Amino acid sequence: MNMKNNLIKLIEKIKANPRTSVVVAVLAAIVIFINVLSIMGNNKNFAGQGNKLITVRQGMTAGEIAALLHEEKLVHHPDIFLIEARIKGLGSKMQAGTYKIECGSSNGEIVSVLASGKIVQSVFAVPEGYNVVKTARKLEAEGLGNAEKFMAAAKNYAPYDYMQTDNPYVVFKAEGFLFPATYEFPAKASEEEILRLMVEQFDKEMRRNGIIQETEKSGLQLRDVVNLAAMVELEAVFPEEQPRIAGVFLKRLEIGMPIQSDTTIQYILGAQKEVITFKDTEIENPYNTYQNMGLPPGPIASPGIGAVKAVLSPEKTDYLYFVAEKDGHHYFSKTYDEHLQAIEKIHGEN
């Protein structure tokens, strides 16, 4: 009853004062416009369920963003969305990145999300000793990329001089240079972008730890250091043994003896094998360090800083052999006879 009386009074005022009628008309138009925006900006009956990740690329216009949202069935009327974005002064403030948007959100809610700059980040960890294939499969298993695309990108990716190689047997030029670390990157980042982040991080860590400078002073090639460090990383279960294992490998190279690392056989086989057989060591492959002298064509995994430093500062001993004990530690020997005795003692008990 009160509302009716108020309405009657308002009409009487408009009749008494024409200017008031103009103001009321404008206000009414604004109210109607706001209601239209609200009604047409409601996307609940248009959108699906759950959440969607939307990537706004650098340089996209508000119109292009509106069209993308319509295509992804988040915004029913892109023109109305565009009007609301401009009214709120956010048309030019919608920042590039990937955003999580709840399906059924209103235009206003979506505009606020895009203007917030709260980009969705993916987290991905590369463990020490992982190679390109294992990294690619982990990436795909966690829903962050396609394994085949990642491996294809790693095949010839070598942006730094020390990564370059003409060896035709190298499977991935980026092998060994995907720094083991936990990464955060925008959701929906491409496989190429993820690979670039890992390789750039490797270069940063090498410079931060003085590795590049140290290799230059020693006359060593960083690629060769990483090559050796990858085998050290995979052989050593306990970090304190890394310098001693590195010393064995370097001593073998020095006297012209094959490195004979089981890790290179596992790289050839493409899987971790608990026991490498004599037959496995006879596989004809450039990466077989039992059959070929010197270093393999390239690194077989991504070593951590500890393994790299171990190669640059190896423990100098007379050891030429080592065999893994049951707890993961190694027994080191100076002669082949001692080595055979150690093998018999450790594995003969099984």
Image (tube, rainbow, N blue to C red):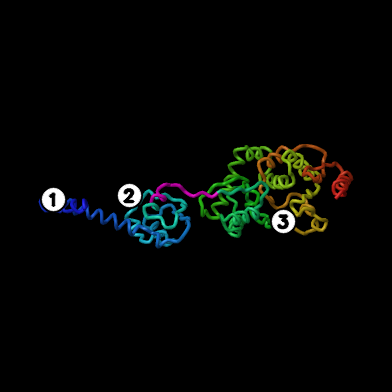
Q: Position of residue 69 (x, y in %)?
A: 41, 58
Give, as a three-letter code, the residue at label 3.
Answer: Ala
Question: Which label sits in the foreground, 2 or 1?
Answer: 1
Task: Tell us which disc is closer to us: 3 or 1.
Answer: 1
Crowding around mark 2 (Cα neighbors within 10 Å: few <14, some 14 to 19, many 20+) is few
Residue 337, by quadrant, is: top right
The residue carrying pointer 3 sits among few (fewer than 14), some (14 to 19) or many (20 or more) residues within 10 Å by Cα, namely few
Which element type, helix, strand or loop, lies under badge 2?
Answer: loop
* Element type at mark 3: loop
User: Where's residue 151, x and y in %?
Assistant: 61, 57
Q: Secondary structure at mark 1?
A: helix
Q: Quadrant of residue 107?
A: bottom left
Contact check, label 2 and label 3, Cβ < 8 Å = no
Q: Residue at x 11, y 50 (%)?
A: 17
Q: What is the magenta range?
A: 111-122
Q: Which mark is residue 88?
A: 2
The residue that label 1 is drawn on is 13
Residue on which the image places disc 3: 271
Distance between the alpha carbons at the discs numbered 3 and 1:
87 Å
Q: Residues within 10 Å of mark 1 (few under 14, many from 20)?
A: some
Sooner in the amino-acid sequence: mark 3 or mark 1 = 1
Closest to the observer: 130 or 54?
A: 54
Q: Is residue 204 magenta?
A: no
Q: Is residue 44 above or below residue 177?
A: below
Image coords of residue 24 (percent x, y): 18, 52
